[in-house]
Image (spheres, grey):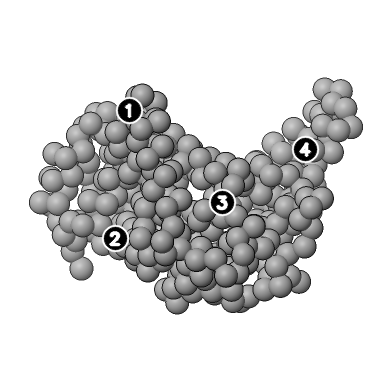
Amino acid sequence: MIEEVGGKGDSFNSKLVHDLLTTALKLIPDGRHTGELKLITGAVKELRYAYRVFGEYPDPHKVTIFGSARTPKDHPDYAATVEFSRLMAEAGWMIITGAGGGIMEAGHVGPGREKSFGVAIRLPFETTANEVIAGDTKLIHFRYFFTRKLMFLSQAEAVALFPGGFGTLDEAFETLTLVQTGKASMIPIVCVEGAGQTYWEEFHHFILKGLLERNLVSADDPGLYKLCKTPAEAAEHIVAFYRNYHSSRYVRDDLIIRMQRRLTDNAVDTLNTEFARLVKSGKMVQSGPQPIEEDHRHLPRLIFTHTRRDFGHVRRLIDRINELDAIG
């Protein structure tokens, strides 16, 4: 069956599809009931379609915007979202929002339809997309929150948080949790709002007083997000995150950080001194691609055996990589 649809029987990707098919068949002798089968089938269908849509736009960086659907058009937060999303589009980025009204609509107004993705959820009280993205091929409708959330984060190289309610805070804390635990790629997370607003100051105060002072988060964890006074500051912060840093991945316990340009030897020595507690054994070294890596093979790497903890400190490491001297 795999070969009939163009798969190569001995490839790793074909093996993964083989495992997927085998897992699906095992659901029958497992005796799963109809509701569970519908959920699994629906989730796989949603993910397959969403990945196909995003797969048509692989190159542009994308930023996900979270925020309230209730924000009126005359609110300072709405204006700030329009400005931020416009600045990101001018920098060559595409915008992902939940496709509804309020902040989500403002996130599409700034860049316009061409540079917008809509990741909508089917709800009894929120069934239509905003007029900017409605009818576009980049509008995807989800039945399940968990598949929708996966696309929000898996397809984005940055997240911008604007004021919102339970849903926005859920998305904010899930993003922070996934990055804090290393379950999601390290990305810039900015907190933005309109002129004269104090939403994120109050949020930050809760993190420091309610969590940090009780030792419920580590000292580096508030550094996973940045409070920005203006949309321009938020856009500049996101773009600067990729000044030299490109991306990262693990090969077993080795953290491989891909960079745009090779660091000087003195810069690597500085990183080994300042971030020694991240290294489980050995030290940080520069290298080319590892044999298992198939993508971005032209980029230089910084490689070290990571302790698999202190991801707030990893965030600071990336900032230093962007600050230190590079070659070329």
Disc 4 to disc 1, how far (Cα)?
41 Å
Among all residues in the image, which is located at the extreme left?
Answer: 266
Asked whether residue 243 is in view, the answer is: yes
Left-right relation of 171 to 249: right
Q: How far separated are the C-alphas under marks 3 and 1?
A: 25 Å
Quadrant occupied by the C terminus: bottom left
Mark 2 — residue?
244
- Which residue is denoted by mark 4 in the rendering? 40
Q: Amino acid at mark 1?
A: Glu
Amino acid bearing label 3 = Gly
Residue 12, above or below 296: above
Q: Which residue shows up at 80% across the image and 41% down it?
A: 41
Question: Of the residues under marks 4 and 3, which one precedes in the sequence?
Answer: 4
Badge 4 amino acid? Ile
Badge 2 density bin: few <14, some 14–19, many ≥20, Cα 10 Å: many
Q: Which residue is mark 3?
A: 164
Residue 126: percent from the left, percent from the top?
76, 55
Structural crowding at the residue carrying mark 1, measured as other residues with C-alpha within 10 Å and reported as few (<14), some (14–19) or many (≥20)? few
Q: What is the residue that sits farthest to the right in this orientation?
A: 34
Spatial separation of the CA atoms under disc 4 and disc 2: 40 Å
What residue would you read off at disc 1? 213
For image coordinates 44% across by 34% down, the residue present is 181
Residue 129: image location, x then y, percent: 73, 64
Q: Measuring from the top left, give residue 32's x and y in whole percent.
A: 84, 26
Residue 48 appears left or right of 296: right
